[in-house]
């Protein structure tokens, strides 16, 4: 039976809440001030505290840090008759998990209590991630389509072939380009990216090839273009299908003869940059419509890497969530460690029109708004889970931690390579000691007749 402490100087209101919540099966304790509430909490050890803001003596906001310090695992709902933005923001920053206005909507309160106590369930095992040697691969995926992409990257990275990466927006085309660069012959060289759709056509030539001082209005000094900045490294031309016919001709010359001329210059410059282009449109269709040069198309796609949309690689979502959640936690300074299985199932059933970029943006917003260490379905748009089939048991709400995701992924890799630890280290990008710690931490063992080998 969950225990709830109500701290409110409104005695009649507190009694009314006590009667209602007791009828729901909760054990209730009452206090009328912050100080008496802290004393009661020390003896009562509540699972959840309903805390009023405006009370005689210390306010609920002033007492909230003390409640959280003394009972860090206890959830807190702030209630107040005042509707000011500053108090709401302050309460959430001080550790409150929800904020409800008076007069209290009983259904709203019941929903908030159920969600917060659900996050405190026995199945919500927490873990502490190792901060050192954190593995943050540029790309992840165990689907057949992504394995094929990885194979092609390995085959072409050390060649000088021009590469065309095709795929829908948000599939990670620049990540593929960076992986090729970092696996190539000059990984320490510059990687210079240019989005051809983000620059107006009149300035694209200058951005790509540079310009001399006075070559056009506003050219107050010489500017190096992307090809010059790339040097012996890699130049990545994104959204290549948006390039005008005039620019297509200039790019074709740069690819054919490894040279270019800055705007306003007389001297031709040589380039040794490796060229990788990307598009989210069907270039053969543009060629057929006369909107893209056929000779440039064939020059660009010496090697073609087709990235699958996220909806066609659903088996990668769990691993992607782990990687992206780690990244989002670092960027936002948060420590959201868990995600409910119900939400993970929503992710796996959703069609992801924005692909991996949409997933990352969704996680960014959810983590920013998350009042605890757990992502639940109420933190994402309701339409994401419309296709979710009702579940007939309560295992839906058991939490899937990042720790569990890591263990499952490593176990899958070990089984694929028949527990050859050397091969597993290569695939996972980890050291032998790190792999050994993971195996011991998750109590992983070979399946069937598989034997451990080095």
Image (spheres, grey):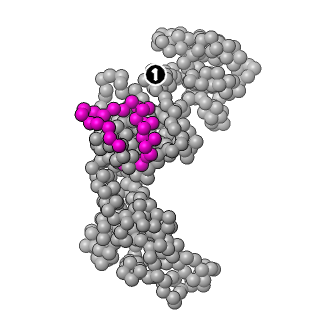
**Residue sitting nearer the eye, 211 or 405:** 405
Q: Position of residue 385 (x, y in %)?
A: 36, 36
Left or right of residue 357, residue 288 in this image: left
Q: Residue furthest front?
A: 454
Image point (59%, 20%), residue name? 49
> Which residues, given as a range, are shown in magenta?
427-454
Q: Is residue 408 above or below residue 223?
A: above
The picture quadrant where one finds residue 6 is top right
Q: Position of residue 443 (x, y in %)?
A: 39, 30
Residue at the spot of label 1:
121
Q: Position of residue 197 (x, y in %)?
A: 44, 67
**Residue sitting nearer the eye, 349 or 448:** 448
The picture quadrant where one finds residue 304 is bottom left
Q: Is residue 314 visible?
A: no
Q: Position of residue 267 (x, y in %)?
A: 51, 88
**Residue sitting nearer the eye, 112 or 433:** 433
Image point (37%, 64%), residue name? 157
Q: Is residue 330 above or below residue 116?
A: below
Q: Is residue 278 above or below residue 223?
A: above
Which quadrant does the C terminus fall into? Answer: top left
Left or right of residue 411, residue 213 in this image: right
């Amino acid at each position: 039976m969950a225990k709830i402490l109500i701290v409110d100087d409104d005695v009649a209101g507190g009694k009314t809440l006590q009667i209602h919540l007791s009828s729901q099966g909760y054990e209730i304790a009452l206090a009328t001030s912050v100080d008496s509430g802290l004393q009661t909490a020390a003896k009562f050890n509540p699972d959840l505290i309903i805390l009023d803001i405006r009370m005689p003596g210390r306010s609920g906001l002033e007492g909230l840090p003390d409640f959280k310090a003394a009972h860090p695992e206890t959830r807190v709902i702030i209630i107040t008759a005042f509707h000011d933005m500053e108090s709401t923001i302050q309460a959430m920053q001080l550790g409150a998990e929800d904020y409800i206005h008076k007069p209290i909507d009983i259904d709203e309160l019941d929903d908030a209590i159920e969600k917060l106590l659900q996050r405190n369930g026995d199945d919500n095992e927490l873990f502490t991630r190792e901060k050192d040697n954190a593995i943050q691969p540029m790309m992840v995926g165990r689907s057949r389509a992504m394995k094929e992409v990885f194979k092609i990257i390995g085959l072409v990275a050390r060649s000088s072939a021009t590469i065309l990466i095709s795929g829908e927006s948000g599939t990670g085309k620049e990540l593929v380009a960076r992986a090729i660069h970092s696996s190539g012959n000059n990984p320490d060289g510059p990687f210079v990216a240019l989005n051809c759709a983000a620059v107006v056509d009149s300035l694209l030539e200058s951005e790509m090839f540079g310009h001399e001082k006075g070559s056009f209005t506003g050219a107050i000094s010489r500017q190096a273009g992307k090809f010059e900045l790339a040097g012996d490294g890699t130049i990545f031309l994104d959204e290549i299908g948006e390039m005008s016919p005039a620019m297509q001709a200039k790019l074709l010359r740069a690819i054919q003869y490894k040279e270019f001329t800055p705007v306003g210059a007389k001297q031709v410059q040589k380039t040794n940059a490796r060229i990788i282009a990307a598009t989210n449109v069907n270039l053969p269709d543009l060629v057929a419509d006369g909107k893209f040069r056929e000779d440039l198309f064939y020059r660009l796609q010496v090697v073609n890497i087709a990235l699958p949309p996220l909806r066609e690689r659903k088996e990668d979502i769990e691993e992607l969530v782990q990687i992206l959640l780690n990244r989002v936690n670092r960027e936002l300074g948060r420590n959201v460690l868990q995600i409910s299985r119900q939400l993970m199932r929503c992710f796996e059933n959703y069609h992801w029109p924005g692909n991996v970029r949409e997933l990352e943006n969704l996680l960014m917003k959810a983590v920013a708004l998350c009042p605890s260490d757990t992502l639940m379905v109420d933190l994402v748009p309701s339409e994401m889970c419309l296709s979710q089939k009702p579940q007939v048991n309560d295992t839906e709400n058991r939490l899937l931690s990042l720790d569990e995701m890591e263990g499952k992924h490593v176990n899958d890799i070990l089984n694929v390579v028949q527990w050859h630890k050397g091969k597993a280290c290569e695939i996972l990008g980890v050291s032998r000691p790190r792999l050994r710690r993971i195996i011991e931490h998750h109590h992983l063992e070979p399946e069937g007749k598989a034997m451990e080998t080095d």
